[in-house]
Image: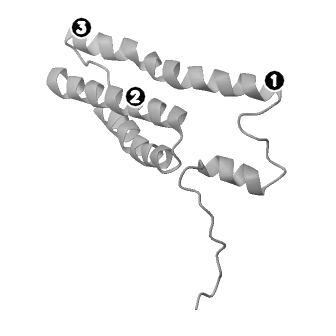
Amino acid sequence: MMLFPVKCMRHEQIHIHQRKRQTNKELHSYPSSKPLIRLVDNIISITSVIYPLALLPQLFQIWLNKSAEGVSLFTWSLLLLFTIPLMGYAFLHKDKRLTIMYCAFFVIYIIIIIGIVLFG
């Protein structure tokens, strides 16, 4: 006998945020019917791809100049370490935008750390 009966529902195909929106009427539907919210969703989709690209100048500086002078291995290692649970969160919630962004950060951090170790 279960202490807390759980209502069974078929949700394998339903995104967790969509399921929350179905049960909580205070949340907006996804995709939203409101133009402003759709605009914000689209901006976030674009930002999730562009934002990690902001690190490319640091990556190119290390690899093209073959020098990591003034670049902290400790800082970049912490950034990599803290990205791992964020990637896990994105995978767990099946959020494509977050998954793309955090995976891109992860790859760039690895390449920068390798450059720091080789050229630092």
In the picture as drawn, the residue positioned furthest to the front comes out as 10
Q: Position of residue 98 (x, y in %)?
A: 52, 36
- In this picture, is 4 found above or below 37? below
Quadrant of the rendered structure where residue 40 is?
A: top right
Give 14 or 109, whichever is nearer the viewer.
14
**Which quadrant is home to the C terminus?**
top left
**What amino acid type is highlighted by mark number 1?**
Pro
**Label 3 SS:** helix
The residue labelled by disc 1 is: 35
Judge whether residue 72 can be spotted in this image.
Answer: no
Give 98 or 96, whichever is nearer the viewer.
96
Point 71% across, 38% down: residue: 30
Q: Position of residue 16 (x, y in %)?
A: 61, 51
Label 2 – label 1 distance at C-alpha: 29 Å
Q: Position of residue 11 (x, y in %)?
A: 58, 57
**Foreground label between 3 and 2:** 2
The residue labelled by disc 2 is: 104
**What amino acid type is highlighted by mark number 2?**
Ala
**Foreground label between 2 and 1:** 1
User: Along the polypeptide, which appears first: circle 3 or circle 1?
Assistant: 1
How crowded is the residue under tag 2: few (<14 C-alpha within 10 Å), some, or many (20+)?
some
Point 74% across, 26% down: residue: 38
Q: Is residue 42 left or right of residue 110?
A: right
Q: Is residue 96 left or right of residue 75?
A: right
Image mark for residue 64: 3
Label 3 – label 2 distance at C-alpha: 20 Å
Given contact means CB atoms under 8 Å apart, are the residues at marks 2 and 1 in contact?
no
Point 77% across, 29% down: residue: 37
User: Along the polypeptide, which appears first: circle 3 or circle 2?
Assistant: 3
**Label 1 SS:** helix
